[in-house]
Image (cartoon, rainbow, N blue to C red):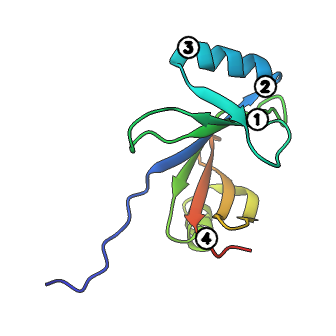
Amino acid sequence: MSTSKKKAAASIVWFEIPADKPERAKAFYGKLFGWKIKPFPGMADYLHIDTGGADASPDGAVMKRMHSTHTITNYVTVPSVTEFMKKVEKLGGSICKAKTVVPGMGYFAICQDTENNTFAIWEIDQAAK
């Protein structure tokens, strides 16, 4: 029996679609893919997307666009946001939004790769405060 710790897969676990008019985007994606899109409790202009997919299909959100070049952001699960922020910078990427808590859920950071693409890293921690 092996005592080594199994490495967790770096899977996409969430995505955000920015929109100038979230209700318009809700109608578009709901009709296009049959996604169920409803308000996210306690967050204005943030709508939860239930993709209705198998376990491998992540849910996501439609959100108010924050700036003119704001594009879809994929969230990739990592064991430690802090450690992966260091790796992003070591590999030539940058941190756009430092480690941020989502109480009772975990932590995220928004990053930019070497090709100017934005993505997020996500650490699950139900004790996050």
Whole-percent x, y for residue 90 in the image: 57, 66
Q: Is residue 41 left or right of residue 16?
A: right
- Residue 22 tag number: 2
Identity, as a three-letter code, of the amino acid under mark 3:
Leu
User: Label 3: few (<14), some or many (≥20) within 10 Å?
Assistant: few
Find numbered disc 2 in the image and state the secondary structure of the residue it sits on.
helix
Q: Residue 79 vs residue 21: left or right?
A: left
Which residue shows up at 68% across the image and 68% down it? Answer: 104
Give the distance between the C-alpha atoms of the residues marked 3 and 4, in whole angstroms. Answer: 34 Å
- Few, some or many C-alpha atoms within 10 Å of disc 2 (few <14, some 14-19, many ≥20)? some
Locate residue 12 relative to residue 48 in the image: left or right.
left
Residue beneath disc 1: 63
* Residue picked out by circle 3: 32
The answer, for residue 73, to whether it is visible in the render is no
**Camera sees residue 88:** yes
Contact, mark 2 vs mark 1 (Cβ under 8 Å):
yes
**Distance between the Cα atoms at labels 2 and 1?**
6 Å
Name the residue tied to disc 4: 126
Query: Disc 2 to disc 4, how far (Cα)?
Result: 29 Å
Q: Is residue 30 above or below residue 120?
A: above
Q: Residue at x 65, y 29 (%)?
A: 37
Asked which quadrant contains residue 118, the reply is top right
